[in-house]
Image (cartoon, grey):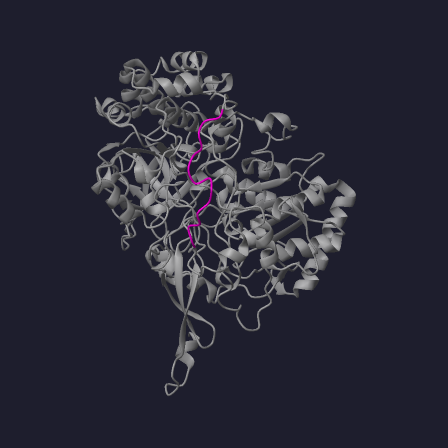
Amino acid sequence: MGAALRRPWSRRLSLRTVTSFCRTCTAGCGTKLTIDDEDRIVSIRGDENNAMSRGYACFKGIHSHEAQYSPERLLHPLKRQPDGTFARISIEQALDEIAEKMKVIIDRDGPEALGLFIGNGANFNSAAFSIHLPFMQAVGSRHFFTTNTLDQSAKMITYERMGFWAAGPQRFDTADVMMVFGSNPLISHASLNFLMSDPVRTMKAARARGMKLIVIDPRLTETARYADIHLQPIPGHDATIAAGMIRMILAEGWEDKEFCERYVGPEGMAALREAVEPFNEEMVTHRAGLPEGQLRAATEMFARDSKRGPVSTGTGNNFGPNSNVAQHLADAMNVVCGRFLREGDTTLVEMLSPEAPIYPEVIPPSRTWEHVPPSRIRGVGTLLNREEMSGTLPDEILTPGKGQIRGLLIQGGNPVVAIPGQKKVVEAMKSLELSVMIDPFMHQTSQYCDYILPPKMPYERADLPLTIPTIVFTTINWIQYTPAAVPPPAGSELVEDWQVYTGIAKRLGLEIEYNHTTKIDLDTVTTDDLLAIRAADGRVKLDEMKKYPSGNSFPFASERVAAPRPEGTAKFDVMPADVRGELEEALAYAITPDNIVSKGRKFTHLVSSRRMRHMFNSVGTIGMPSVRARAKFNPAYIHPADMADLGIENGDHIELESDVGKITAIAEADETMRPGVISIPHGFGPATGEMDEDGGVSIGALIVADEFYQRVNAIPRMTAIPVNVRRLSSRIIGHQTAEVE
């Protein structure tokens, strides 16, 4: 029972309002917190004074305080006992023991026997964000993994192989047209510069001013309902569709010839033309299962009839087979059509980066992975010269030899759910000599850890929104500081996430160069000190941010794209040799609507991953009863016609069998699905891969990380999974809806 309900009825409740912002997802919407006289948040609403989110807040955001006061929240450090149970210990004892065990591992096997895995819970923590890599560098290990390499890392691969435009793509608010591959931003709030916060109202305004919308997705998503043209292919053919569109654009002369001449060049254009030549309209239409003429109609709308507005992509095409070349071709379409900001356009910038002119020019390919020793697992390198590939983490733990990971620190992540092939991930976790989790809840991965260190939760700490160099998450040039709004629960022993790193470093005698710029005093540094260091070289200093409780869109000299400069002569590499090889593999990809084959075996359906309205990955599956009431489990969504053919009814238990595993799921009819395709939301299910008591199951049990993976980033195929389906038993349940907010 909540504290407010325990008060004597005669006592008057005293409430106050505090301004902050949400850290549930990348949108970072402004919030107003109602706090009682016991310093507890009793309700959350959107901040109407926040110019970025404009009073909007989603369901999961306005109920996020439930997790803060959940009886499931861990309030004291825990240590695993010999019998597998956990016992409470002090934070000082925990850090002493962890550092001691790390030293034993380092002395015996070297510093590269230690690794760090970061999840989304760590990304939305600005003070901790810039300590992760410096800590690992101080230790002397390159084993730094994040969920980025299991999400949309193909974007980074494309930037490094093709180059990218320094001024960024054209903006949504000035677009004549938008094309969306494999993304549902009205639900995810996670497409860069595009429908982050307040997505429905923003989309309606854009459509009212005449913007056209093209969506490519196997499901009639909430975003696709606003589309002028919805291409509904089978999953797995994004590269084929993009190649077919580029071929048509070049054949018809709809490209931006002046832009291509200057920033691609005749040689590059010739290589691109030759590579996409096999992807004619008839072939693409058949392979992807599109209605005749639809590919041309969409390409005409985007390239012939419109001049402003880019292609945007999401997890759909980044999860699929041939995902790296699919992303490359989507970005190449923006190049071919010149869909980038030019001189005088208002640009979007990452506000913690230094003030400098932004030029309309190509940042040439860097291919950083070619300049570091390859991993001993699958021969992959690093992303942006810093991150190893999370798809290889289980094998980095299990494979003997120099560099084998024996100790793993995890912050705000759940690799047992996030990394495909759960059996191997669990085996890897069990084999570790030391495993430490920084997380407020006991979840699928925590249960295998030796130590669990619960941190303060978002409204209990000072913070800045998610900011990553060169990546812009906002739709206006925006920054906001929030102080801690409430104290941690009484009697708890919690730490700031970053204090785990400073505490271990102090015990190991290491120095940390925070943000790669400043050596910090491990004894005296504060959260505000760290945030000030992050902002020190940025466009806005921390003290200036603090003057605006609801955040501010600060003016700065480079907010408009500068004139081209003579030295800006770099060109896009639109079809390098390795991308050409991947495109040939996409050309050989044999799965079509009438021929679903894997490893020589025939299957009947394809499984795709999807998000649920009230979830951000696995956020809300623990500690948030309002969310759990609406999303107790993740159904297998199937078109009614398929259900009729299979003799399946709503609530039936069904078995989905892939070429590597089986899961049991609960069937639910969904008319938005393309027949032949089944979608299952990710982020659910126990570590065993079996169904939990509510019906939740992990799609990761249908796939493994060491098959059908991409060369550069080792990301496995996580959608377009061939399966066979059979009915097991009947269990009628209430339906779960996925309607838009």
On the picture, is 459 further left or further right than 98?
left
Residue 186, above or below 721: below
Say if residue 666 shows up in the picture.
no
Observer-nearest of 449 and 686: 449
Residue 582 % position (x, y):
46, 20
Residue 669 % position (x, y):
25, 44
Q: Quadrant of the N terminus?
A: bottom left
* Residue 553 magenta-highlighted: yes
- The magenta region covers 552-565
Prevailing secondary structure class for the magenta stretch in the rendered image: loop
| Label tally | 0
Residue 186 % position (x, y):
32, 45
On the picture, is 558 further left or further right than 80?
left
Residue found at x 36% / y 36%: 607
Residue 54 % position (x, y):
33, 55
On the picture, is 449 further left or further right than 636?
right
* Residue 55 magenta-highlighted: no
Observer-nearest of 636 and 182: 182
Observer-nearest of 270 and 423: 270
Residue 538, above or below 317: below
